[in-house]
Amino acid sequence: MKNGIHPDYHPVVFQDSGTGSMFLTRSTVTSDRTVEYTDGRTYPLVVVDVTNESHPFWTGAARVMDTQGRVEKFERRYGKRR
């Protein structure tokens, strides 16, 4: 790898704005905000709108589609296949 062409890859804390949960990972993103994480060290803080803690798919709050109604609508529009 060439030296001096890659961005700085460092530990960053991401925080879910809805639930307040935080997780530590590595990223190239920068931030002016910092937070003291559970390990006692201070890291840059990036606040995000959605994480696995608040996304409907991962929390089980995802909307279930009415597949029976969709099939009936298709059959009314195009007829039944034989």
Image (cartoon, helix red, strand yellow):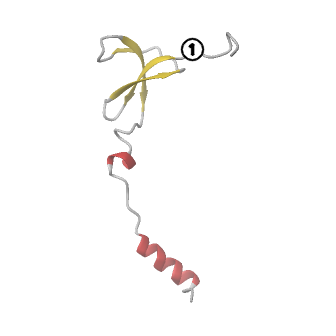
**Residue for point 37% across, 46% down:** 58
Going by the image, does 43 lie left or right of 5? left
The residue under label 1 is which amino acid type? Asp
Q: Position of residue 10 (x, y in %)?
A: 49, 16
Q: Quadrant of the N terminus?
A: top right
Expressed as whole percent of the image width and height from the top left, the position of residue 40 reads 30, 11
Please identify the quadrant where the C terminus is shown: bottom right
* Residue farthest toward the bottom in the current orientation of the protein: 82
Q: Which residue corresponds to the image point at 29% horizontal and 18% vertical from the top-left?
A: 38
Instruction: Tell me which residue sits at (38%, 61%) in the image.
Output: 64
Residue positioned 44% across, 19% down in the render: 12
The picture quadrant where one finds residue 44 is top left
Q: Secondary structure at mark 1?
A: loop
The correct choice, above or below, for 61 with respect to 9 in the image is below
The residue wearing badge 1 is 8
How many discs mark residues in the rendered view?
1
Task: Report the residue that reaches farthest toward the front.
Answer: 1
